């Protein structure tokens, strides 16, 4: 699926799925409906939460109103029901799609630097094990496109938040300038951090995927 085939004019042309970029909501509704049609499902089958860079995990089922979920603050959601689509929206942040190895449960995770620093992936895996009895080793993970070290300069707040992952940073300026001024002088490999967190959370396969800015997964 690409950005083609939607209803939005420039600069959102044309399959824009975001309500937060200035596009008309009715066009975004139609674009999301067209995406759902690719699975032969109605728009009400697509669940995307109100993302807040936290670690909250939601479970969604067919009897839950998708519009209600859209207003709930969360950065991960999962389902065990076929015919239910769970998704997260990203720009710079990393989308992580999880699927149980037998396909009976899926999860979509939004991992920006704040969520990654708060351990969202490990938190989600722990919650999934408690709720579903599925061990972390049974999940497969796909980490989607996101901003990388060549484009993401950060300050001391981000650098210090990832003290355990210093190898995810590269030096951009003199250490003295970074330490004294707090300027954005290091760049963060946002793809590397959540991927390392995923892999350290116990044996989970990770693969890079390309796609649009709405990442969706559904149970078998």
Image (tube, rainbow, N blue to C red):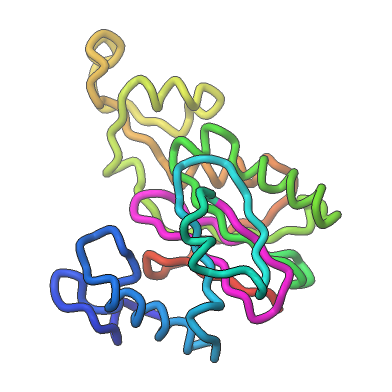
- Residue beneath the point at 52% across and 78% down: 44
Q: Magenta segment: does it hold 122?
A: no
Front residue of this view, candidates 83 and 113? 83
- Percent across and percent down for residue 187 are 32, 33
* Residue 17 position (above or below residue 175): below
Q: Which of the 4 image quarters holds residue 140? A: bottom right
- Percent across and percent down for residue 38 are 48, 88
Quarter of the image for the C terminus: give it: bottom right
- Residue beneath the point at 27% across and 78% down: 27
Report the residue that reaches farthest toward the left: 10
Q: Magenta segment: does it hold 87?
A: yes
* Residue 8 position (above or below residue 149): below
Q: Which of the 4 image quarters holds residue 212? A: bottom left
* Left or right relative to 129: residue 43: left
Front residue of this view, candidates 201 and 116? 116
Q: Which of the 4 image quarters holds residue 174? A: top left
**Residue numbers of the magenta segment:** 76-97
* Left or right relative to 128: residue 77: left
- Percent across and percent down for residue 192 are 48, 43
Total of numbered circles in the picture? 0
Quarter of the image for the N terminus: give it: bottom left
């Amino acid at each position: 699926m690409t950005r083609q085939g939607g209803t939005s004019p420039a600069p959102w042309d044309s399959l824009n799925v975001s309500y937060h970029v200035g596009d008309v909501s009715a066009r975004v509704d139609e674009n999301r409906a067209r995406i759902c049609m690719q699975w032969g499902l109605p728009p009400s089958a697509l669940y995307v939460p109100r993302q807040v860079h936290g670690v909250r995990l939601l479970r969604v089922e067919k009897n839950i109103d998708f519009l209600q979920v859209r207003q709930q603050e969360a950065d991960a959601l999962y389902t065990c029901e076929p015919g239910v689509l769970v998704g997260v929206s990203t720009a710079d942040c990393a989308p992580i799609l999880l699927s149980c190895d037998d396909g009976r449960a899926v999860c979509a995770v939004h991992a920006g630097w704040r969520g990654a620093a708060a351990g969202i992936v490990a938190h989600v895996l722990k919650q999934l094990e408690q709720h579903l009895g599925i061990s972390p080793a049974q999940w497969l993970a796909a980490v989607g496109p996101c901003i990388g070290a060549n484009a993401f300069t950060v300050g001391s707040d981000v650098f210090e938040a990832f003290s355990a992952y210093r190898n995810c940073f590269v030096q951009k300026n003199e250490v003295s300038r970074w330490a004294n001024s707090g300027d954005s002088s290091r760049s963060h490999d946002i793809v590397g951090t959540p991927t390392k967190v995923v892999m350290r959370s116990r044996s989970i396969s990770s693969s890079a995927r390309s796609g649009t800015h709405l990442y969706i997964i559904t149970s078998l």
